[in-house]
């Protein structure tokens, strides 16, 4: 969330959008809400940028798209890999699969459910059934 706020704030400031700091704070806070939050944060920024000129509105739209792509496809998988040792490819496939099977609700719940299933498989199958020692996210080493 912090990276989204900083990148958005710097980009809006560089584009000359009024109230760049306030819009960056809104982007930071709304980034907590999956899918809908970034869109809700972009709307007031784009509308405010359109008051400057149409080119600034278009560049603001591109800024929000680029920041969300960086966060969603680069930063978020790397952070989740370090936090729960979840392979990024597994999370991406889980998002796609849950989205295809369950729609928007599946996408919203895919990441936390994947983490839960990953931990359960490591604890119940790998450790208990196979008897192999493995690190389980969330346990003290």
Image (tube, rainbow, N blue to C red):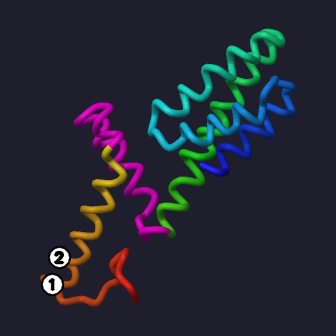
Magenta region, residue range: 83-108
For residue 53, above or below residue 68: above
Q: Is residue 32 left or right of residue 51?
A: left
| SS category of the residue bearing label 1 | helix
| SS category of the residue bearing label 2 | helix
Q: Nearer the viewer, residue 111 or 133?
A: 111
- Say whether residue 106 is magenta: yes
Query: 10 Å neighbourhood of mark 1: few (<14), some, or many (≥20)?
Result: few
For residue 43, above or below residue 115: above
Marks 1 & 2, CB-CB < 8 Å contact: yes
The residue sitting at 67% across, 50% down in the picture is 3
Could you say where residue 116 lies in the image, as x and y percent from the top left?
27, 62
Whole-angstrom CA distance, mark 1 to mark 2, is 6 Å
What is the number of the mark on residue 90?
none
Look at mark 1 in the image and give the residue it sits on. 128
Quarter of the image where one finds residue 19: top right
Q: Nearer the viewer, residue 131 or 34?
A: 34
The residue sitting at 22% across, 70% down in the picture is 121
The residue sitting at 39% across, 54% down in the picture is 91
Could you say where residue 129 lies in the image, as x and y percent from the top left?
12, 82
* Magenta-colored segment: predominant secondary structure: helix
Query: 10 Å neighbourhood of mark 2: few (<14), some, or many (≥20)?
Result: few
Look at mark 2 in the image and give the residue it sits on. 125
For residue 88, above or below residue 11: below
Could you say where residue 112 lies in the image, as x and y percent from the top left?
33, 54
Q: Is residue 44 left or right of residue 38?
A: right
Q: Nearer the viewer, residue 53 or 100?
A: 53
Q: Residue furthest left?
A: 129
- Say whether residue 5 is magenta: no
For residue 83, above or below residue 18: below
Q: Quadrant of the C terminus?
A: bottom left
């Amino acid at each position: 969330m912090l990276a989204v706020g900083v990148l958005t704030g710097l980009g809006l400031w560089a584009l000359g959008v009024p109230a760049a700091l306030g819009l960056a704070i809104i982007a930071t806070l709304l980034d907590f809400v999956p899918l809908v939050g970034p869109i809700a944060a972009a709307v007031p920024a784009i509308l405010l940028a359109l008051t400057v000129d149409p080119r600034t509105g278009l560049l603001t739209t591109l800024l929000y798209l680029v920041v969300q792509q960086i966060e969603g496809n680069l930063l978020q998988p790397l952070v989740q890999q370090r936090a729960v040792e979840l392979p990024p490819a597994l999370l991406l496939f889980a998002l796609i699969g849950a989205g295809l099977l369950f729609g928007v609700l599946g996408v919203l719940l895919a990441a936390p459910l994947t983490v839960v299933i990953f931990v359960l498989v490591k604890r119940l199958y790998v450790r208990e059934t196979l008897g192999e020692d493995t690190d389980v996210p969330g346990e003290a080493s």
